[in-house]
Image (tube, helix red, strand yellow):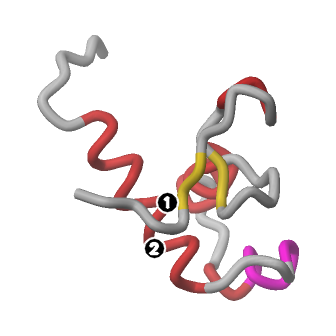
Amino acid sequence: MKFTRITADANQMGGVPCIRDIRIPVSTIVGMIADSMAIAEILEAYPDLALEDIQESLRYAAEAVKERELTA
């Protein structure tokens, strides 16, 4: 799967996966969704984001944990 809206640069944010080089970590977006924040609220809080950024963040997170063993 190719992610066109997610970037990871060792010289930016310590290499943490971010949205389109704008220094908003994927984990921040996923965390807000997990905390029941509405997409409209996220877009209002981060006007540089687009709906596609949020959708790709969730796909990225799903792919990141795919086929890995998790402990509960």
Task: State the residue at coordinates (69%, 47%).
Answer: 25
Please give the count of numbered marks on the rendered protein.
Answer: 2
In which quadrant will I find the N terminus? bottom left
**Label 2 Cα neighbours within 10 Å, binned few <14 / some 14-19 / many ≥20:** some
In which quadrant will I find the C terminus? top left
Q: Position of residue 65 (x, y in %)?
A: 28, 34
View extreme (top): residue: 71
Q: Which residues are magenta?
A: 41-46
Q: Position of residue 12 (x, y in %)?
A: 80, 35
**Mark number displayed over residue 26:** none
Looking at the picture, does residue 59 appear above or below residue 61?
A: below
In this image, 12 relative to 69: left or right?
A: right
Q: Amino acid under label 1?
A: Ser
Image quadrant in which you'd find residue 19: bottom right
In the foreground, 32 or 68? 68
Task: State the residue at coordinates (49%, 60%).
Answer: 57
Q: Amino acid under label 2?
A: Gln
Q: Position of residue 14 (x, y in %)?
A: 75, 24
In this image, 52 relative to 59: left or right?
A: right
View extreme (left): residue: 67
- The kind of secondary structure element at disc 1 is helix
Residue holding disc 2: 55
In this image, 2 relative to 13: left or right?
A: left
Looking at the picture, does residue 3 appear above or below residue 16?
A: below
**Label 1 Cα neighbours within 10 Å, binned few <14 / some 14-19 / many ≥20:** many
- The kind of secondary structure element at disc 2 is helix
Instruction: Provide the major secondary structure of the magenta segment.
Output: helix
Asked whether residue 7 is drawn in magenta, I would say no
Residue holding disc 1: 57
Is the residue under label 1 in contact with that under label 2 (CB below 8 Å)? yes
Measured in 3D between alpha carbons, the distance from the residue under mark 2 to the one under mark 1, in whole angstroms, is 5 Å
Image quadrant in which you'd find residue 20: bottom right
